[in-house]
Image (spheres, rainbow, N blue to C red):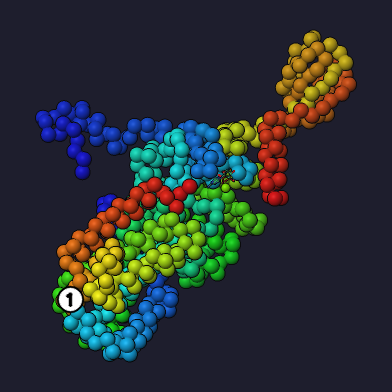
Amino acid sequence: MTRFTSYRIAFQTILTKEILRFCRIWIQTLLPPAITTALYFIIFGHLIGERIGEMDGVRYIDFIVPGLILMAVITNSYSNVVSSFFSSKYQRHVEELLISPVPNWVILSGYVGGGLARGVLVGIAVTAVSLLFSDLDIRSFGWTLAVFVLTSILFALAGFINAVYAKSFDDISIVPTFVLTPLTYLGGVFYSISMLPGFWQKISLANPVLYMVNAFRYGLLGVTDIPIGIALAIILLFIAGLTAFSLYLLNHGVGVKS
Amino acid sequence: MEQAPGSAEKGDLWLRCSYHLRFAFPPGAVFMNALLLQNLRKTYRNGFEALKGIDLEVAPGDFFALLGPNGAGKSTAIGIVSSLVTKTSGRVEVFGHDLDRNPEAVKGCIGLVPQEFNFNQWEPVAEIVVNQAGFYGIPRKQAWIKAERSLRQLELWDRRREQAVSLSGGMKRRLMIARALVHEPRLLILDEPTAGVDIEIRRSMWSFLTEINLRGTTIILTTHYLEEAESLCRNIAIINQGRIAEHSSMKRLLNQLHNQAFVLSIEQDLTRIDELGDYRWQRLDEHTLEVEVSRGQSINGLFQALAQRGLEVTSMRNKQNRLEQLFIGMLNASRRRDAQ
Ligand SMILES: Nc1ncnc2c1ncn2[C@@H]1O[C@H](COP(=O)(O)OP(=O)(O)O)[C@@H](O)[C@H]1O
Ligand SMILES: [Mg+2]
């Protein structure tokens, strides 16, 4: 058996374990985003949206669909990895991996793969809900899929880093509450930044989530506030940086070895 | 695949043979240890020096005890060997593989049963064992076969579908043993496997370990019970405060332990005696004698031997041997710690 085969088997094992984990607790992991999104659609899309009219030339309810899908993907990819990896530290079963001949990049891929799997499943659920309220007519399927997958990977990586540093359950909710949620809400999910005064538009440009939401909205609706090439470059840059940092942390045993 | 040097050139046969022989007989193969530690040191981040340069050799096939009181550094040493703790300096070799140069080969040789439960409590028993096999690169189907064998050996197969959290303490320990054995490691390391396990389960665990050792698995276990080490292991190292205090065979150690030494004051002048039967003795001064009484010899016999030589004992005291003192000191220390 070649080394590569062993790695592939180890990767599949971690990935399957991760998928089974969130499926076992689907009431906590898969159901809430579907319900939350339905509420957003009813309240913002349907009740309030009808008074708002159009935004960037599309119906308001259609305008918020991409942002809501992506918001669910971001939150779920992140929280899947942060809670899974933190609890593997907390219950110490991360040691099962540390003593095994699995390279760190395989461990990282397995966990990120788990976050991506949950992102995909939640994305599908939320998209299904959104079809009840608006007719999605995808402009560019490839582009939509690419942004979807890359965003999910990016936040899975971020969740991993959060888990590495986390020492208590508080630490795994601080970042989502105080950083992630504000960034997504201010990332142009519910509005076009062209509505903002010039100063706030500039501030918004420092928010990486803005680029992802716009790139995704471009894939689905064909409208965007910013050049999509730049958006893609920024996403890729973040992924590269976070991957390198995660591997550095694993190689130095930060948070897992004494 | 690596290419044999010179194979492209027209053949220096000897060179090529010796190159290929390297794989059949890796350097040092004859004297290869299952575990070799050289000057191993560990200082934790808080500045505490848990290992102060330990050396250890464990031969293949051995059943080896690392004995020491709580806090001696046993788990730290085990942790370094199994890649859970990073060493500060020193050298670790497992079956000839260097931990720094080839960590994956080292990891592949070892099965670890840690001191504390470290499985996912919410996973079913079988999944824990099958996944561990997967981490070692064993394909799913084979992993199930191996897991079944391993779980049956430890009488857990009937509970395979239950969540680990529902097992009793003894079963959880057995689960960790089953998990450690699933990839058939050459070296099984158990960190205090019987701590907090009742006497019956302890005995059955002992006979199980003896059996797999007889079938060829090298075993290292840490313990703070002298009795456990004594009834299981062939070789032993005693560790205390991060240092190896003794490293020898169990037989030699027990002999030392079972020898009692007495210091006798003798009325007569001792310079004229030059033998004392089977007793090992030494003259401390003209009127003082130190005698060892080993297992099978009696103190009565000693007095007879002295009387036959016209020697009269005026007083006698027990001289504790160094090891006993060491043990008692250790046990007191660990008792104090347990009481806290
Ligand atoms: N992560 C750590 N940080 C600081 N000190 C530690 C850590 N782990 C263990 N120690 C200390 O190192 C010493 C040896 O611990 P350990 O190897 O667990 O002993 P043993 O297994 O022999 O009981 C103890 O004094 C313990 O308090
Ligand atoms: Mg210990």
Q: Chain of mark 1?
A: A
Question: Residue A192's spot in the image, x, y percent?
Answer: 24, 75
Q: Quadrant of residue A156?
A: bottom left
Q: Is residue B321 above or below residue A79?
A: above
Side of A161 relative to A63 (left or right) = right
Q: Is residue B208 above or below residue A59?
A: above
Which residue is identified by label 1? A223
- What's the residue at 78%, 19% (across, down)? B289
What type is the residue that disc 1 sits on? Answer: Val
Question: Residue A26's spot in the image, x, y percent?
Answer: 40, 77
- What's the residue at 55%, 52% (across, down)? B115
**Residue found farthest to the top:** B272
- What's the residue at 59%, 65% (across, down)? B168
- What's the residue at 20%, 71% (across, down)? A225
Query: Quick one: label 1, few (<14), some, or many (20+) residues within 10 Å?
Result: some
At mark 1, the secondary structure is: loop
Question: Residue B287's spot in the image, x, y percent?
Answer: 83, 15
Question: Residue B103's spot in the image, x, y percent?
Answer: 37, 44
> Is residue A80 visible in the rendered structure shown here?
no
Q: Nearer the viewer, residue A160 or B323?
A: A160
